[in-house]
């Protein structure tokens, strides 16, 4: 019956988004789900000879293969993974700030001619950007300051939210007036202001300063207003959207809005129908099934439909129509249903061609003038194709593909090393800016108890993951960090010393796990009164084997059991192989399910929409990558982001709220203070374990010898390096 909640979360997720709704500036998104760890590869790979992917003829094409399905969402902020982001990174550029090969933020002088920073008397700070002339979209239209202003006004608008956009948009975060504008309380966003055709200003609110990663607040990218919201213009205040002077609201505008609104209604109704169908199936299995959470979800969806119906009626009758809002909403509906899947107006080194049969194909943008270094690509086409995870490296070795990025499995690495000796492949390795993690939804029984989470950490021999999955190319972590993270490089040794004094070095220790569980509510046998006995458990393990059933229970008679979802068979098997036998010795029942990548993402990101007691899983094995801007607040570890797709752990803790809020408010020049705060954050994480760090490891990009000039780093993946790559077959 738990599958019902999974279905609900999946359906509600279809028109919701995750992370920053902007296109290509540095983001403050939660850690991305990374390649090589998540997809079980359940589908058989297509035979390239029998059914070639679009653009699969070699030529001057970089053929990239990844061991997971792409979602087909190619606009930042929608439910997707780092696989889709590879494509996005190829088709968007010209942000005010970008990261270089070392992960440092630099002003993008290809886009920005001049930057002027003013500290205002009220404590706010204004950045004025003058854009270089000559920038255009792939379609030839000129890029001006209006496009940067529009991008922020569009992505932070309530209309975009209603079209299915993120429930926790970071677009415009920190700028004056963001909260009121995003909530629909103001039509103007004063922290964003158009000055003239080539200049715009972004003003950071005084109460948002200092911020350690300040330039993120003023990172902006162009968005084509003529494509996203035709008929609109920037208002005289420079901070709002109005109907263009040469446009009059027409019957065609009304019809386009009504069509988009009806499509949105149909999507919402489909979700309602699916929930009702799932309820009926669940009730048939269990007459006592509690459908209250499902009915609440249906009521919320019906309320959205009712609002849309009222607005359609008003628009068709011409009553109290705000023409600017109607055009904005109409554009938002259209972008969410068309551009998302086939972005036709872009700014990057490549332009989108198609996505079909799990193959995304892009081709060189003839109007691209270069990245922040002024470089343009020589590779004519790039394809990113989702394949069975078991064959990605084989395809490179066999000449069917050119690059398999982010490989961690030792078997594949060994195979590629042998091929390298034969002159077929070349390996690029770098320490990971991320980690593998067993994440928990900490509002759900039984993992809402810290003692249970800590006990689980003592029931896993995590070194087996390092050795078994990555062949020893990694470390067992004790906190929220990755091997290449600059904070870990600076303070990692000190942190490991500190956990000996103030924290916990988690290793396999069943006795310690039992001690911790004895401090939890799960201290009884099935009757809810007889104390559970570790000696009995050990005896039952010997005598009962697979029929073991001597689980811990709480006073209500609820058994101690955790349901775990994972999409990487290799990682899942190691964790389950540890937790099932060791869990029995501690009276903990562990159930691990191999699920497809998309289902995992939907459950992980949208679990908050389901009541904790009805969740399908309380634990997830994932691979998470960190951005150069390491901000735990924006990674979701703050209650401000509770009940959003960012706070995936469902964490609501005033102590960590204080730690993460104060950490980000450190002056950018005070690196020592930030590193000291990082240590305190890591100690909190080590003690509370909203997720158990499994390992941080080396990544291997495995390329054919046809690929020349590739030079990847933890913060400079292949798609960033594309302007230096060439193909020589």
Image (tube, rainbow, N blue to C red):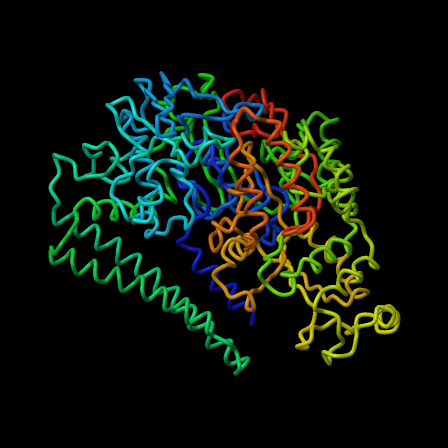
**Residue 66 horizontal side relative to residue 356, left or right:** right
Name, please, the residue furthest toward the bottom: 287
**Residue 711 horizontal side relative to residue 328, left or right:** right
Location of residue 577 in the rendering, given as x and y in whole percent from the top left corner: 76, 57
Residue ID at (41%, 18%): 109
Location of residue 651 in the rendering, given as x and y in whole percent from the top left corner: 56, 54
Q: Of residues 484 and 375, which is closer to you in this image?
A: 484
Location of residue 292 in the rendering, given as x and y in whole percent from the top left corner: 46, 73
Q: Of residues 159 and 388, which is closer to you in this image?
A: 159
Q: Is residue 701 visible?
A: no
Residue ID at (53%, 23%): 100
Q: Is residue 105 visible?
A: yes
Q: Of residues 107 and 7, which is closer to you in this image?
A: 107
Q: Quadrant of the C terminus?
A: top right
Name, please, the residue furthest toward the front: 121
| 247 to 146, vertically: above or below | below
Q: Quadrant of the N terminus?
A: bottom right
């Amino acid at each position: 019956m738990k599958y019902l909640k999974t279905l609900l979360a999946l359906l509600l997720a279809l028109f919701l988004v995750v992370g920053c709704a902007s296109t290509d500036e540095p983001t403050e998104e939660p850690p991305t789900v990374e390649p090589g760890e998540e997809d079980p590869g359940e589908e058989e790979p297509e035979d390239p000879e029998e059914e070639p992917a679009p653009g699969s003829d070699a030529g001057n094409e970089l053929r990239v293969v990844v061991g997971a399905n792409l979602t087909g969402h190619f606009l930042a902020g929608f439910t997707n993974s780092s696989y889709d982001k590879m494509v996005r990174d190829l088709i968007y550029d010209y942000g005010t700030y970008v990261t270089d090969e070392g992960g440092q933020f630099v002003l993008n002088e290809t886009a920005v001619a001049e930057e002027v920073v003013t500290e205002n008397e009220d404590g706010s700070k204004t950045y004025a950007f003058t854009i270089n002339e000559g920038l255009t979209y792939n379609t030839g239209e000129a890029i001006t300051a209006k496009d940067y202003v529009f991008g922020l006004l569009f992505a932070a608008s309530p209309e975009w939210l209603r079209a299915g956009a993120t429930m926790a948009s970071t677009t415009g975060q920190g700028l004056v007036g963001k909260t009121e504008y995003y909530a629909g309380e103001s039509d103007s966003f004063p922290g964003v202001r158009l000055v003239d055709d080539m200049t715009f200003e972004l003003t950071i609110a005084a109460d948002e300063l200092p911020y350690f990663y300040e330039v993120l607040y003023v990172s902006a990218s162009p968005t084509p207003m003529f494509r996203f919201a035709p008929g609109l213009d920037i208002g005289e205040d420079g901070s709002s959207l109005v109907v263009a002077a040469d446009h009059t609201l027409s019957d065609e505008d009304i019809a386009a809005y009504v069509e988009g609104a009806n499509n949105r209604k149909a999507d919402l109704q489909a979700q309602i129908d699916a929930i009702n169908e799932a309820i009926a199936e669940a009730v048939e299995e269990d007459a006592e099934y509690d459908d209250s959470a499902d009915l609440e979800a249906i009521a919320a969806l019906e309320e959205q439909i009712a609002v849309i119906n009222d607005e359609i009626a008003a628009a068709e009758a011409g009553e109290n129509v705000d023409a600017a809002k109607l055009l904005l909403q109409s554009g938002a509906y259209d972008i969410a249903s068309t551009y998302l899947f086939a972005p036709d107006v872009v700014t990057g080194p490549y332009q989108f061609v198609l996505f079909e049969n799990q193959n995304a194909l892009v081709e060189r943008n003839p109007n691209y003038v270069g990245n922040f270094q002024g470089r343009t690509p020589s590779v004519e086409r790039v394809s990113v194709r989702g394949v069975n995870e078991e064959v990605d490296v084989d395809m490179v070795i066999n000449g069917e593909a050119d690059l398999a990025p982010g490989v961690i499995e030792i078997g594949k690495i060994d195979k590629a090393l042998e091929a390298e000796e034969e002159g077929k492949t070349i390996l690029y390795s770098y320490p990971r800016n991320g980690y593998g993690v067993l994440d928990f939804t900490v509002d759900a029984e039984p993992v809402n108890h810290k003692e249970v989470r800590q006990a689980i950490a003592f029931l896993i021999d995590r070194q087996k993951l390092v050795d078994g999955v990555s062949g020893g190319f990694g470390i067992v972590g004790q906190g929220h960090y990755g091997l290449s993270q600059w904070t870990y490089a600076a303070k990692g040794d000190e942190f490991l010393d500190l956990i000996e004094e103030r924290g916990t070095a988690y290793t396999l220790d069943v006795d310690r796990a039992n001690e911790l569980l004895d401090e939890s509510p799960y201290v009884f046998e099935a009757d809810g009164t007889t104390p559970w006995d570790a000696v009995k458990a050990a005896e039952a393990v010997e005598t009962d084997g697979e029929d073991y059933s001597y689980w811990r229970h709480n006073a209500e008679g609820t058994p101690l059991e955790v349901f775990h979802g994972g999409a990487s068979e290799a990682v899942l098997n190691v964790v389950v192989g540890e937790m099932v036998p060791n869990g029995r010795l501690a009276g903990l029942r562990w159930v691990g399910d191999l699920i497809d990548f998309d289902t995992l993402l939907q459950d992980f990101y949208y679990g908050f929409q389901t009541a904790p007691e009805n969740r399908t899983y309380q634990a997830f094995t994932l691979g998470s990558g960190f951005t150069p801007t390491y901000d735990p607040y924006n990674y979701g570890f703050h209650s401000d982001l509770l009940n959003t797709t960012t706070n995936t752990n469902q964490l609501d803790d005033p102590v960590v709220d204080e730690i993460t809020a104060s950490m980000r408010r450190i002056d950018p020049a005070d690196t020592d203070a930030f590193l000291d705060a990082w240590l305190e954050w890591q100690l909190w994480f080590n003690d509370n374990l909203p997720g158990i760090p499994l390992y941080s490891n080396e990544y291997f990009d495995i390329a054919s010898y046809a690929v020349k000039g590739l030079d990847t780093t933890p913060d400079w993946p292949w798609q960033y390096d594309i302007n230096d790559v060439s193909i020589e077959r």
